[in-house]
Image (cartoon, helix red, strand yellow):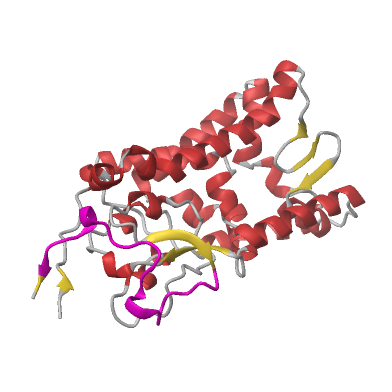
């Protein structure tokens, strides 16, 4: 029986080169480009009102009104409002329910990778960290963000305020772009330096209570990444290297005895970087019930292995 030869892990400086050679630029960067377009477009919609008087969207990511019709409310903000002892207006409740339904469908932490502008900062920090080959890091528990989530709700209840909005970097970015607040840029710089030089993915992966909250929404989401063609995997581990939440990807990479082909972990951000960077096209976005474990050959019959993807095999 022939098995794929194990390939040496790709050095950080060469991540993505094989995918570029095999798949081309667009298929290697497609989901990254679409995420950046989404993040920048959403931020721009909030800015063109105060900048140019074109009010397509009024408000911010905490609470907004689109075209004077569609209310959207961050359910985390609504939860703080309730904890603080205030009864929100019905439009805020409706807006929160719309957002809840959306992220429960597509994956809660999709907010982190497709909407949150701070993700651009933390991705830039990780890129610099990779280029400088910084390996040392301060070990932080991923449970910290859930403790911060509980602390924010506790402070809101104790002081009767929406506590997180006083220090929320996302809100600070929008205010800084409108009013030029210097302190906001200092906070953003601190997050960048933290992620680049102190601990890998420290802010999003270990500290941010918003990411913790949205991870809880994605527990049963329909849209998931599927390692649909693991038989093609050459064990280069580039997907693991670029994954912002590395623990979520390891279960589906097991050659023997993997529990599922679907990445169901609530901390997966649905960023699509594993799909982009995989030269053998192991991954794709899929529905959570399309599990390939137990399927003949454990691969996708609709997508035969391309000759350019085949690796040297051992007898």
Q: Residue at x 68, y 30 (%)?
A: 45
On the rendered image, what quadrant is the N terminus found in? bottom left
On the rendered image, what quadrant is the C terminus found in? bottom left
Taking depth in this image into account, of 2 and 170 the one nearest to the observer is 2
Q: Residue at x 14, y 67 (%)?
A: 5
Q: Is residue 300 magenta?
A: yes
**Is residue 110 rendered to the left or right of residue 25?**
right
Taking depth in this image into account, of 69 and 186 the one nearest to the observer is 69
Residue 193 seen in the current view: no
Percent x, y for residue 113?
52, 48
In the image, residue 19 sits, relative to residue 304, either above or below, namely above
Taking depth in this image into account, of 73 and 165 the one nearest to the observer is 73
Numbered disc total: 0
Percent x, y for residue 228?
40, 67
The part of the image, by quadrant, that contains residue 240 is bottom left
Q: Residue furthest left?
A: 315
Q: Residue at x 27, y 52 (%)?
A: 136
**Is residue 241 rendered to the left or right of residue 179?**
left
Taking depth in this image into account, of 76 and 160 the one nearest to the observer is 76
Residue 1 seen in the current view: yes
**Is residue 29 rendered to the left or right of residue 53?**
left
What stretch of residues is rendered in magenta?
A: 288-313
**Is residue 191 rendered to the left or right of residue 58?**
left
In the image, residue 148 sits, relative to residue 117, either above or below, namely below
């Amino acid at each position: 029986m022939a098995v794929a030869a194990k390939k040496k892990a790709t050095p950080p400086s060469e991540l993505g080169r094989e995918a570029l050679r095999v798949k081309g630029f667009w298929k290697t960067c497609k989901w990254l480009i679409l995420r950046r377009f989404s993040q920048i477009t959403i931020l721009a919609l909030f800015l063109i009102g105060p900048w140019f008087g074109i009010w397509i969207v009024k408000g911010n990511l905490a609470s907004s009104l689109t075209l004077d019709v569609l209310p959207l409310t961050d359910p985390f903000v609504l939860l703080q409002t309730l904890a603080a002892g205030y009864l929100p207006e019905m439009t805020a409740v409706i807006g929160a329910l719309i957002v809840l339904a959306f992220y429960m469908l597509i994956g809660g932490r999709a907010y982190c990778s497709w909407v949150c502008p701070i993700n651009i900062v933390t991705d830039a920090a990780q890129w610099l960290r990779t280029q400088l080959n910084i390996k040392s890091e301060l070990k932080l528990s991923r449970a910290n963000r859930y403790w911060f989530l509980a602390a924010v709700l506790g402070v809101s209840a104790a002081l009767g305020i929406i506590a997180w909005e006083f220090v929320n970097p996302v809100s600070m970015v929008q205010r800084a772009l409108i009013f030029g607040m210097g302190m906001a840029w200092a906070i953003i710089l601190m997050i960048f330096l933290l992620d680049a030089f102190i601990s890998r993915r420290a802010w999003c992966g270990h500290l941010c209570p918003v990411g913790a909250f949205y991870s809880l929404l994605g527990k049963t989401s329909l849209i998931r990444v599927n390692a649909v063609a693991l038989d093609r995997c050459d064990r280069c581990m580039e997907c693991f290297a670029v994954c912002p939440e590395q623990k979520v990807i390891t279960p589906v990479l097991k050659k023997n005895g993997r529990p599922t082909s679907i990445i169901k972990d609530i901390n997966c951000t649905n960023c699509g970087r594993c799909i982009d960077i995989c030269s053998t096209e192991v991954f794709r976005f899929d529905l959570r019930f399309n599990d390939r474990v137990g399927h003949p050959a454990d691969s996708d019959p609709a997508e035969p292995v391309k000759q350019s993807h085949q690796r040297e095999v051992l007898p």
